[in-house]
Amino acid sequence: MKKEEQLIVCDLTVFSTDTRRQMAAAVPDMFKAVQKVQELPDGYAFQFPNEPGMFMTLANFVEHERQCCPFYKFALEAESNGGPFWLRMMGGEGVKEFMQTAWTDLPGAVSKQLIRTGPEHDLDEVITQAAPILADTLEKASVSAKRDEDDEEKLGNGNAK
């Protein structure tokens, strides 16, 4: 299979049962801390606060996600002077759409096998409970984009005077 033909499926079965459970609990908590989201042409950039342990939490997330979601390309940045951290999740064709579908409809993504959880049905429930958190995270991107458009419009109107 060519690299660009890779399936876009989150396969949590690559991990032990304990690791799957830990990730299912930790990922929503991590995304609750997102301060801002920027939509990118091929994914999203998530801003996190510069708090103790946050960079290591993000690095641990990337380490695990690379195994279950090998289609993602990640970039982790620490801004200067104590600024925030940025996690960029990007990929080839279909990856951004996967995020939009899987993150906004986790129960549907599990049932459609976009997310493979393994034989533990209680894990499906844990992931389903994370749905509102991840959906809210992506909603921040559209709110941020709308705010940027409004700011540009105000600047444009101000320059016309």
Image (tube, helix red, strand yellow):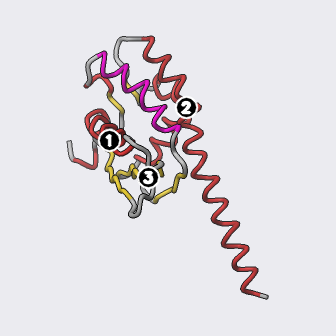
Q: Which mark is residue 56?
A: 1
Residue 77 spot, x, y in % from top left = 35, 56
Which quadrant of the rendered structure holds the C terminus? bottom right
Would you place residue 95 above or below residue 128 in this image? below
| Mark 3 element type | strand
Of circles 3 and 1, which is in front? Answer: 1
* Residue 81 is one of the magenta-drawn residues: no
Residue 101 spot, x, y in % from top left = 51, 38
Q: Callout 1 environment at 10 Å: few (<14), some (14 to 19), or many (20+)?
A: few
Residue for point 45% across, 41% down: 98
Q: Which mark is residue 89?
A: none
Please name the amino acid that badge 1 sits on: Met
Please name the amino acid that badge 2 sits on: Asp
Sooner in the amino-acid sequence: mark 3 or mark 1: 3
Please name the amino acid that badge 3 sits on: Gly
In the displayed structure, does residue 85 sit left or right of residue 14? right
* Residue 27 is one of the magenta-drawn residues: yes
Of circles 2 and 1, which is in front? Answer: 1
Would you place residue 24 above or below residue 32 in this image? above
| Mark 1 element type | helix
For this orientation, the residue located farthest to the bottom is: 161
- Give the CA distance from mark 2 to mark 1: 28 Å
Q: Which mark is residue 105?
A: 2
Q: Which residues are magenta?
A: 17-32
Q: Cβ–Cβ below 8 Å for labels 3 and 1?
A: no
Sooner in the amino-acid sequence: mark 2 or mark 1: 1
Q: Cβ–Cβ below 8 Å for labels 2 and 1?
A: no
Residue for point 29% across, 34% down: 64
In the displayed structure, does residue 85 sit left or right of residue 3? right
Residue under label 3: 43
Q: Callout 2 environment at 10 Å: few (<14), some (14 to 19), or many (20+)?
A: some
Residue 26 spot, x, y in % from top left = 42, 28
